[in-house]
Image (tube, grey):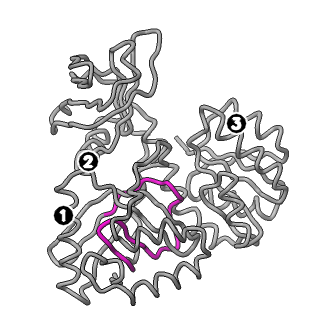
Amino acid sequence: MSLQSLVFCSDEKILRVLRRVLSDLEVRVEQCGDADSAIHKLTRQRYEAVIVDCTDEQEAAHVLKSARSAPSNKRAVAVAIIDGEKAVRGAFDLGAHFVLYKPISMERAKSSFRAAHALMKRERRRNQRVLVEIPVALIGTDGRLETVTVDLGEGGMAVQAGRLSKNSKGLRLQFNLPGSRAIDTAAEIAWENSSRQTGLRFVDMLPAERQELKRWLERVSPDDIAKDDPPVSTRLTDLSPAACYLETSTPFPMRAKVLLSMRVSETALQVGGIVQVMHPDKGMGIEFIRTTQAQRANLEKFIHVLHDNHGAVAELFVEPEGLETAEFASIKDTQGDPLLELFFRKADLSAEEFQNELSRQRGGGSSEKSAAAAAFSA
């Protein structure tokens, strides 16, 4: 099944480029020339992407706001078409995840849609469910409840259980994937219905368990579920115990959840992260999600290996896990980590100004804990 996009634009030159690029990506285009018809469609049909020409900023804001408020499209990837780099901040303030600069060329549009397309496919997969009954244990402050699943997907599951406590804290799920491994993850209540069913959203699932769940779902899912795009190869320029900065022409948007796979010499590491800084066509800053002591230790080991093998080529690939809507528990106390501190203090700088700050920072730190001051090339 093709991905679906709604394009709010009346410029024929732009539309020709978008139709060509999106057709090559197997994305169906539905075009609207006026805001009212676009909003009407957003309330009645699901789209994986909403692409908006921001020539009229007021109308563009109205369409993007309507997409966010429509239950079926609140997680659609939003792309804003803007006049230049000076309009980037305004586009993001309107709710855009990606921007396309005018004039739009075929080559530039292909490059810009690479990351957007990967996220569109991830979001569709996250929302798809496999009908399956698997025993599952729900463990919370109210005790332990044994039940069975109604369906299962990458982002969560539905179970046969009615009226769970909305105030339940520290909820955990334990279940075994048939023919595979056991999963133990935190979860939160997403919805409940009158049929005594409850939807549960996975929270901070370990990367290894998430990858195993993805592989299991691929084996048992219908053939029409599209495979993810390949991970994006990037250049690692800055790394600290809490964050990294990656140079790439196809960065993922702010608040996107990503999975990084890093290797240097014989040492490999997978770590989850949240994009905290994004510069279109330039790069992105990622804060690591470190949920266990073992993950923190593995990350610090990787940094030591990079120090000990100065000049070694580090391989780094990044793939999206989805558009994160829940509030991420960021480490606001940066614990002396200069790179993460830079993300929080200087996120609003232009790409050039931010790169200058990174360069100054690399030349300033000397302690091993301030590993962000060192640059690693990959």
Name which of mark 2 and mark 1 comes first in the sequence: 2
Q: Identity of the amino acid at label 2?
A: Leu
- Residue beneath disc 3: 42
> Where residue 345 sits: x, y (%)?
52, 68
- Label 2 residue SS: loop
Badge nearest the viewer, 3 or 1 = 1
Q: Identity of the amino acid at label 3?
A: Leu
**Mark 2 to mark 1 CA distance (whole Å):** 14 Å
Q: Residues within 10 Å of mark 1 (few under 14, many from 20)?
A: some
Q: Residues within 10 Å of mark 2 (few under 14, many from 20)?
A: many
Judged left or right of residue 295, residue 361 is right
- Residue beneath disc 2: 206
> Where residue 367 sits: x, y (%)?
27, 82
Bounds of the magenta span?
A: 237-260
Label 2 close to label 1 by CB (< 8 Å):
no
Q: Identity of the amino acid at label 1?
A: Asn
**Mark 3 to mark 1 CA distance (whole Å):** 44 Å
Using the image as rendered, state which of residue 306 and residue 370 is in the foreground.
370
